[in-house]
Amino acid sequence: QAAPPRRSNIPARGRPDARPRSDHPALGRGAMLRSGVKRGGGGGIIDKMIPGYKDKMWAALPQGVKQYKVKSENDAFESGIASHQKWQSMFLSWKSTEQGFAPSQKHRKPAVDWRRQMERGTM
């Protein structure tokens, strides 16, 4: 005989009254679908089995490949800086223009109309 189908709100292991992880209030709806930042200082299992394997692989690469990898990584980093500098210059030029839009104290009306005074409670 086939086993009866398992109810979806009962986990395979653990307490039968435990909620499924996707409905947990701390996780929020859909939190299982998002990837989180994995933090830890131990490295992976390969690093434990073969210490310094990345350095060994890097040493085995041809000089042209190493130069290409370093150049592409540096170019990617510097392109972000160049993009920032371009937007920053545009933004700062706009901010200097924007200061001219501030209301001038020369044309300030010293009186406050009654509607504003009623709103502020200063009537």
Image (cartoon, rainbow, N blue to C red):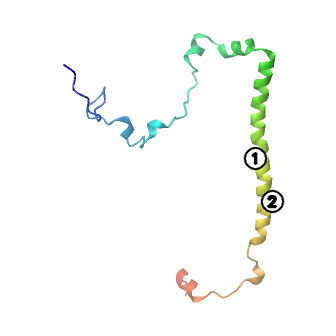
Q: Where is residue 20 in the image (x, y as percent from the top left)?
A: 34, 35
Indicate left or right for 117 with 8 as reference: right
Name the amino acid, label 1: His
Is residue 115 visible to us here? Answer: yes
Q: Where is residue 78 in the image (x, y as percent from the top left)?
A: 78, 37
Q: In which quarter of the image is residue 96?
A: bottom right
Question: If the image is split into quadrants, where does the C terminus sit?
Answer: bottom right
**Residue sitting at 56 percent across and 30 percent down?**
39
Q: In which quarter of the image is residue 68?
A: top right
Q: Is residue 13 above or below residue 53?
A: below
Nearer-N-terminus badge (2/1): 1
Is residue 52 visible to us here? Answer: no
**Residue sitting at 76 percent across and 78 percent down?**
104
Secondary structure of the residue carrying numbered label 1: helix
Q: How far apart are marks 2 and 1 (CA)?
A: 14 Å
Nearest the camera: 103 or 87? 87
Nearest the camera: 19 or 64? 64
Name the amino acid, label 2: Ser
Q: In this view, does 93 lie above or below 57?
A: below
Q: Residue 93 carries which label?
A: 2
Indicate left or right for 108 with 30 as reference: right
Secondary structure of the residue carrying numbered label 2: helix
Question: If the image is split into quadrants, where does the N terminus sit?
Answer: top left
Q: Check the image and name the residue furthest to the left.
A: 1
**Residue sitting at 57 percent across and 83 percent down?**
116
Q: Which mark is residue 119?
A: none
Disc 1 designates what residue? 84
Indicate left or right for 105 with 30 as reference: right
Q: Position of residue 16 (x, y in %)?
A: 26, 31
Pointer 2 local density, CA inside 10 Å: few below 14, some 14–19, many at least 20: few
Q: In this view, does 88 lie above or below 81?
A: below
